[in-house]
Image: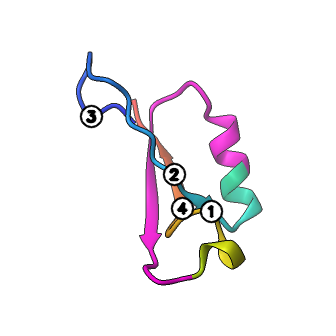
């Protein structure tokens, strides 16, 4: 995640539940994307994902 050109990139850890969304993320590697996500605080990450952020859609931006 790069908020401003020339800034140090920041890591955004998230989980993906749907295979189609994961494939779209993989196919858009190297492109600028916008992630649509839901935040679920208090959900045990060991059971449902790696973080409390769950990506639901990917939009490729130009």
Of callouts 3 and 1, which one flags the residue occurring earlier in the amino acid sequence?
Answer: 3
In 3D space, how far apart are the residues under numbered discs 3 and 4 (Cα atoms)?
19 Å
Q: Quadrant of residue 10?
A: top left
Q: Let me know if residue 37 is in the magenta part.
A: yes
Q: Which residues are magenta?
A: 23-43
Q: Residue 50: horizontal and vertical position, in percent?
A: 62, 62
Q: Residues within 10 Å of mark 1 (few under 14, many from 20)?
A: some
Would you say the residues marked 3 and 4 are in contact, meaning their CB atoms lie under 8 Å apart? no
Exactly how many numbered labels are in the figure?
Answer: 4
Q: Residue drawn at (61%, 35%), measured in percent from left and top?
A: 28
**Local crowd at mark 4 within 10 Å, few (<14), some, or many (≥20)?**
some
Of callouts 3 and 4, the N-terminal one = 3
> Considering the image in quadrants, where does the C terminus appear?
top left
Q: Which residue is mark 2?
A: 13
Q: Which mark is residue 50?
A: 1
Q: Of marks 3 and 2, which one's residue comes earlier in the chain?
A: 3
Q: Residue 34 magenta-drawn?
A: yes
Q: What distance separates the C-alpha of mark 4 from that of mark 1?
A: 12 Å
């Amino acid at each position: 995640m790069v908020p401003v050109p020339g800034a140090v990139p920041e890591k955004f850890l998230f989980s993906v539940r749907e295979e189609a969304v994961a494939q779209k993320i993989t196919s858009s590697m190297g492109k600028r994307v916008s992630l649509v996500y839901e935040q679920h605080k208090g959900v045990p990450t060991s059971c449902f994902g790696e973080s409390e952020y769950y990506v639901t859609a990917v939009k490729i931006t130009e």
